[in-house]
Image (cartoon, rainbow, N blue to C red):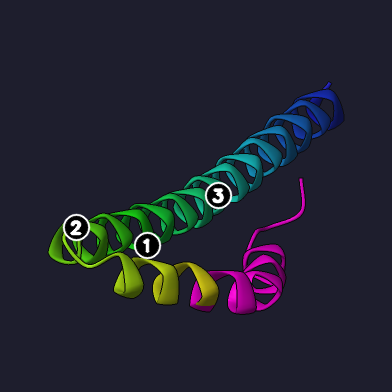
């Protein structure tokens, strides 16, 4: 009978260990997701500020568009590299 209690204890222990690991993984995923979201918000806020600051200067806006287009591949690669796999 004591071995059944011991086995039950081991099962409970490993179940709790698995749940804790799963929770830790979930917390890490949420943190990574928040980092990606915060980075995107910073990017969009910066872009918005640049557009507002240059609203009366079409050439500056065109230069900004050209710069964004030139860097779009690098941006896509950075987002992919820093986004955790699902």
User: Of helix, strand and loop, which mostly describes the magenta segment?
Assistant: helix
Assign the C terminus to one quadrant of the image. top right
Task: Tell me the residue that label 1 is attached to.
Answer: 43
Q: Label 3 to label 2, Cα distance in Å? A: 46 Å
Q: Residue at x 71, y 64 (%)?
A: 80
Drawn side of residue 40 relative to residue 70, left or right: left
* Residue 15 is a magenta residue: no
Drawn side of residue 7 relative to residue 83, left or right: right
What span is colored magenta in the figure? 67-86
Residue 20 image-quadrant placement: top right
Task: Tell me the residue that label 3 is attached to.
Answer: 24
Are circles 3 and 1 on residues that touch, CB within 8 Å? no
Q: Position of residue 83 (x, y in %)?
A: 65, 59
Between residues 9 and 67, which one lies in front from this camera angle?
67
**Which secondary structure, mark 2?**
loop
Circle 2 Cα neighbour tier, 10 Å, few/some/many (<14 / 14–19 / ≥20):
few
Relative to 33, residue 42 above or below: below
Between residues 76 and 52, which one lies in front from this camera angle?
52
Q: Earlier in the sequence, mark 3 or mark 1?
A: 3
Q: Position of residue 26 (x, y in %)?
A: 58, 42
Circle 3 Cα neighbour tier, 10 Å, few/some/many (<14 / 14–19 / ≥20):
few
Are circles 3 and 2 on residues that touch, CB within 8 Å? no
Q: Label 1 to label 2, Cα distance in Å? A: 18 Å
Q: Label 3 to label 1, Cα distance in Å? A: 29 Å
Circle 1 Cα neighbour tier, 10 Å, few/some/many (<14 / 14–19 / ≥20):
few
Relative to 73, residue 33 above or below: above
Task: Tell me the residue that label 2 is attached to.
Answer: 55
For marks 1 and 2, give the one nearer the viewer.
2
């Amino acid at each position: 009978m004591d071995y059944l209690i011991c086995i039950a204890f081991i099962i409970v222990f490993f179940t709790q260990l698995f749940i804790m690991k799963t929770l830790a993984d979930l917390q890490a995923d949420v943190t990574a997701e928040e980092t990606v979201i915060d980075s995107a918000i910073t990017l969009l806020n910066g872009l918005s500020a640049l557009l507002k600051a240059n609203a009366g200067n079409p050439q500056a806006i065109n230069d900004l568009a050209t710069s964004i287009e030139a860097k779009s591949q690098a941006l896509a690669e950075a987002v992919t590299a820093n986004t955790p796999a699902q």
